[in-house]
Image (cartoon, rainbow, N blue to C red):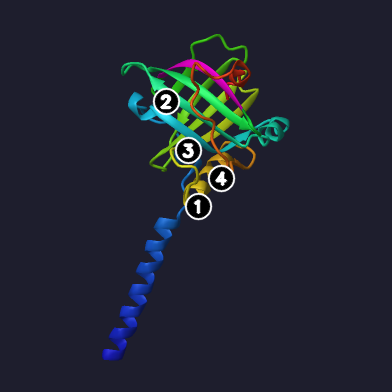
């Protein structure tokens, strides 16, 4: 009886382990992976976000995107309202370029308050990364798409990057271009920055 009991115990434990591991490893559906945020609180945007990785549906623009050494955005929210100043920055070699805009957001979507010839709208998407911001841009009414993963950190864990890759696959986007975390970010823009360094950059 003891030997039989042991065999039954081992069998049950094995089945339980298999079922448990299967439930944890089951991949999320695309509907879940790329669902928009239910609501983005303005205070969550505040501060500097470093670009960790990004993807663009236009492969020619991907090659241009790869020239960046680093990139990021600075958000300043306006007294708890659903508007914010949005300043993009990118470093190419020893030069920094900045592009300021104002955005308005409602729920998970955002638009640029200034006139945009690119007809640009965006969506904040869900991410399990606790200190990340996932932004998906629709340019010229679905003519092309840009998807960027920002974080307060310069480098993410492997599981967080794997999630981003899966999200891009669901969006039918090219594999991500990953920024080099050792490359220095541009300093925050000030009024004393030389004019050459304040060249506007693409909103995305």
Q: Position of residue 52 (x, y in %)?
A: 53, 40
- Highlighted range, magenta: 96-105
Q: Callout 2: few (<14), some (14-19), or many (20+) C-alpha neighbours within 10 Å?
A: some
**Residue 122: assigned label:** none
| Residue closer to the observer: 153 or 55 | 153
Q: Callout 1: few (<14), some (14-19), or many (20+) C-alpha neighbours within 10 Å?
A: few
Residue 1 appears in view: no
**Residue 182: assigned label:** 4
**Residue 31: assigned label:** 3
Could you say which quadrant of the image residue 9 lies in?
bottom left
- In the rendered structure, which disc, 4 or 2, sits on the residue that comes first in sequence? 2
Q: Is residue 196 above or below residue 14?
A: above
- In the rendered structure, which disc, 2 or 1, sits on the residue that comes first in sequence? 2
How far apart in space, not on screen, are marks 4 and 2 (Cα)?
Answer: 31 Å
- In the rendered structure, which disc, 3 or 2, sits on the residue that comes first in sequence? 3
Q: Position of residue 49 (x, y in %)?
A: 46, 33
How far apart in space, not on screen, are marks 4 and 3 (Cα)?
Answer: 34 Å
Question: What residue sits right under mark 1 in the picture?
Answer: 158
Quarter of the image that includes the C terminus: top right
Secondary structure under the numbered disc 4 in the rendered image: loop
Could you say which quadrant of the image residue 118 lies in?
top right
How far apart in space, not on screen, are marks 2 and 1 (Cα)?
Answer: 26 Å
């Amino acid at each position: 009886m003891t030997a039989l009991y042991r065999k039954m115990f081992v069998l049950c434990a094995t089945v339980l382990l298999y079922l448990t591991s299967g439930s944890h490893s089951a991949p999320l559906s695309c509907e879940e992976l790329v669902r928009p945020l239910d609501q983005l609180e303005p205070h969550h945007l505040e501060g500097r976000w470093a670009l960790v990785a990004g993807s663009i549906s236009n492969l020619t623009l991907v090659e241009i995107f790869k020239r960046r050494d680093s990139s990021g955005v600075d958000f300043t929210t306006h007294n708890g309202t659903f508007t914010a100043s949005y300043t993009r920055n990118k470093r190419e070699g020893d030069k920094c370029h900045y592009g300021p805009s104002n955005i308005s957001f409602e729920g998970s979507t955002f638009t640029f308050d200034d006139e945009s010839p690119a007809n640009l709208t965006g969506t904040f998407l869900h991410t399990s990364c606790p200190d990340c911001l996932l932004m998906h841009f629709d340019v010229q009414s679905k003519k092309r798409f840009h998807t960027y993963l920002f974080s307060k950190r310069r480098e993410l864990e492997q599981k967080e990057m794997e999630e981003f890759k899966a999200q891009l696959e669901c969006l039918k986007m090219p594999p991500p271009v990953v920024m080099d975390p050792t490359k220095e970010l541009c300093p925050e823009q000030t009024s004393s920055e030389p004019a050459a360094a304040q060249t506007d950059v693409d909103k995305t």
